[in-house]
Amino acid sequence: MPFSVEFFPPRDAEAEGRLWRAVRIFERLSPAFVSMTYGAGGSTRDRTVRITGELAAQTTLLPVAHLTAVNHSIAELRALVGAYADQGITNILALRGDPPGDPLGEWVAHPEGVEYAEELVRLIDTLGDFHVGVASFPEGHHRAPDLDHDTANLVRKLRAGAEYSITQMFFDVEHFLRLRDRLAAADAEQAAKPLIPGLMPITSLASVRRMVELSGSVLPPTVEERLSTAAGDGPEEDRAAVRAVGIDLATEMAQRLIAEGVPCLHFCSLNFAKATSEVLERLGVDVRDALGAPVGA
Ligand SMILES: Cc1cc2nc3c(=O)[nH]c(=O)nc-3n(C[C@H](O)[C@H](O)[C@H](O)COP(=O)(O)OP(=O)(O)OC[C@H]3O[C@@H](n4cnc5c(N)ncnc54)[C@H](O)[C@@H]3O)c2cc1C
């Protein structure tokens, strides 16, 4: 089963070391691609550009660079795309991004920038021979007034030239399947492009709650219940028990998605290889050579 992995730019040298250990493990598992998220500003953005370049130059992996419109003029966006091209990176995930500080706060476009991801897709298309992907939202984007509006936006981004989309992580496969149905009903031609589900093996209940909240959503009640039972009533959540349930959940979702014929599974790795590798092992991937020993050991 093709799979891909998402990384984020590490904060410091120690975190960068951790990232590279995960990169080397994943490299041996041959993902279809790896992607690097783009932060809200400054040094984290520089790190995204630098490390994505290093992934292209120093590994066998196919890197996809996330790029957002936040606080960038069109001239800056052009320069960034040029910097990627100079490093041999031709795969870009075109995103609008969220307001820095408060992702759910008011969105203000750069006065000389773009308003929507669709414009970024078109801009990148004018700059060379790039393969562009976009974001999709199984539960609808939190700013979209309804699901039809959300689907129409995804169709526009695909018609503008995006070759595939990766979904926001979700924890109820039904949401993904309904998005796929909406897309097929809205535009059969665009629906033929890969719709790649975003999965995250949960290893901490507190962190996943926060992540889901920041995306304007909530955990499905059955998932919340399984995780909170595992977390227990103590002052600290039982991380080992939560992690075990998180791996079970991700495996169950992946198995259902594979049965539903998805083209690829996109894992948000949080820059660690172990949890994703455990899920892959349960899906039948031989991970022993990559990790040096069975991950269950
Ligand atoms: C796979 C994935 C990866 C991501 N990676 C990053 C990352 O690296 N860095 C980061 O900061 N964020 C990232 N995000 C978050 C993303 O930037 C936010 O969810 C953002 O709020 C939406 O981005 P978008 O590209 O979907 O925006 P858009 O497609 O532009 O949509 C934004 C909103 O505008 C609405 N809209 C679009 N066009 C129109 C129109 N013409 N008229 C009216 N309304 C319209 C849409 O319905 C939606 O509500 C990622 C999300 C996903 C799913």
Image: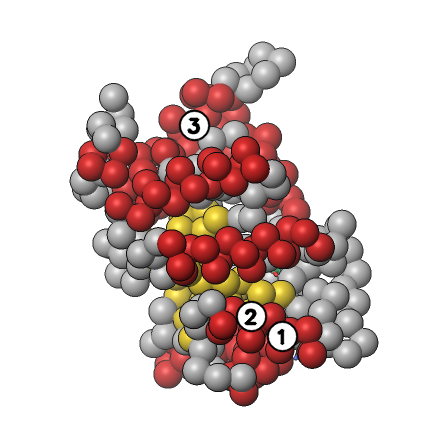
Residue positioned 32% across, 41% down in the render = 25
Q: Which amino acid, by three-letter code, is at mark 1?
A: Ala
Residue 224 point in image, percent of width and height: 52, 33
Q: Which amino acid, by three-letter code, is at mark 3?
A: Arg
Q: Which residue is mark 3?
A: 243
Quarter of the image with the N terminus is bottom left
Q: Which mark is residue 83?
A: 2
Residue positioned 66% across, 69% down in the render = 69
Task: Report if the beta carbon of the residue with label 1 is closer than 8 angstroms to ligand 1.
Answer: no
- Which is nearer the N-term, disc 1 or disc 3? 1
- Badge 2 density bin: few <14, some 14–19, many ≥20, Cα 10 Å: some
Residue positioned 31% across, 56% down in the render = 60
Residue positioned 38% across, 35% down in the render = 275
| Above or below: residue 134 compared with residue 232 | below
Per the model, the C-alpha gap separating discs 1 and 3 is: 42 Å
Report the number of numbered marks. Answer: 3
| Above or below: residue 286 compared with residue 57 | above
Q: Is residue 237 left or right of residue 262?
A: right
Q: Which residue is mark 1?
A: 79
Q: Which amino acid, by three-letter code, is at mark 2?
A: Ala
Res. 194 visible in picture: yes
| Above or below: residue 51 compared with residue 67 | above
Farthest-out residue, bottom? 126
Per the model, the C-alpha gap separating discs 2 and 1 is: 6 Å
Comparing 275 with 223, the one in front is: 275
- Which is nearer the N-term, disc 3 or disc 2? 2
Residue 99 point in image, percent of width and height: 74, 58
Marks 2/1 in contact by CB < 8 Å: the verdict is yes
Q: Give residue 193's quadrant in the image.
A: bottom left
Q: Quadrant of ligand 1?
A: bottom right
- Badge 1 density bin: few <14, some 14–19, many ≥20, Cα 10 Å: few
